[in-house]
Amino acid sequence: MKFAILGAGAVAGYFGARLDAAGEDVTHIARGAHLEAIRSSGLRVESANGDLHIDPAKATDDPAEIGPVDYVIFAVKLFDTEASGAMAKPLLGPGTTVVTLQNGVESVEVLSGILGAEHVMGGTAYISSVIAEPGLIRQTGTFATMVFGEADGGRSERGEKLETACRGAGFDVEFSEAIETRIWMKFLILVAMSGITSVTRKPVGELRHDPDIRRLYENAIAEAGEVGRRRGISLPEDAVAKQMAAVDNFPPEMVASMVHDLNGGKRMELDWLSGAVCRLGREAGIATPVHDTLYAALKPYKDGT
């Protein structure tokens, strides 16, 4: 099948490389030094799950050079959603599916308005990885899972074909019948990890056993969960306990990707993470003091330097 990886960075670039190595027809859409490195030296992955070197790797910054594909794996930073969604239009044919693996909870709605709801499938990813240098993706730990699903919770041919391709590429995959819940469950832990590891600039292993910081994690997760429930999202009663158990199982050196942006002086996704909890909470009439504080503390750095 034909894939375009739109935003072939630390997350989608990893999954795209695995699909590429498995024999799928993959083109990586990137920019800047990362694109030039892929073009000149291929795409490398360093991972405990097995290193890869895709060389040559098809790469471009212009989707019009690719034309319609079967699947677009869409994983740009949240602040680039609208611009990249418009840029993706040349990739669409009648049967093209755009799977968003972005961090927030509003991507499906935004992309549906740009590309048409019939083309968009919600998704999320569980992986800790970073662009260690242009052309090189380095994974922390071994977990790497792609989750996606139809909005109505049903099965579909396009979902089953994608599931088969991902299994063939050797990473974990789930064709979920409750994708909205899965997206929000990821969001609960993501906004806590992003805010707390960014404010402290410390990895999770140095934070999670401190009773005060652990309580901060719990409150951040619970607060986001209450916003989700008020918006009609079905979340388990033990959502906080489930996500704290996940925090306890993260590699001790893990930090949220926002920490790398903060330390690198890059623009951050803050407005769509803790900022979204605050904004959606106000819309729902819910107080969000934890995320109000995390957002305010990080706001001076959100646009980079």
Image (cartoon, rainbow, N blue to C red):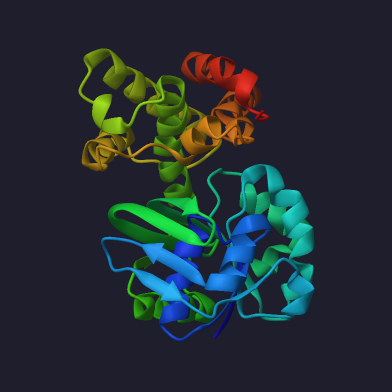
Residue 3 percent location from the top left of the image: 58, 77
Figure quadrant of residue 92? bottom right
Direction from residue 120 to residue 17 in the image, left or right:
left
For the question of whether residue 176 can be seen, the reply is no
Residue 2 percent location from the top left of the image: 59, 83
Residue 204 percent location from the top left of the image: 30, 32
Image quarter where the N terminus lies is: bottom right
Direction from residue 36 to residue 235 in the image, left or right:
left
Direction from residue 91 to residue 4 in the image, left or right:
left
Figure quadrant of residue 50? bottom left
Image quarter where the C terminus lies is: top right
Query: Between residues 180 and 40, which one lies in front from this camera angle?
Result: 40
**Residue ID at (54%, 57%):** 134
Figure quadrant of residue 210? top left
For the question of whether residue 21 can be seen, the reply is yes
**Residue ID at (33%, 31%):** 203
Query: Between residues 174 and 85, which one lies in front from this camera angle?
Result: 85
Q: Relative to 223, is 77 above or below?
A: below
Q: How many marks?
A: 0
Query: Between residues 193 and 27, which one lies in front from this camera angle?
Result: 27
Residue 154 percent location from the top left of the image: 48, 69
**Residue ID at (37%, 20%):** 219
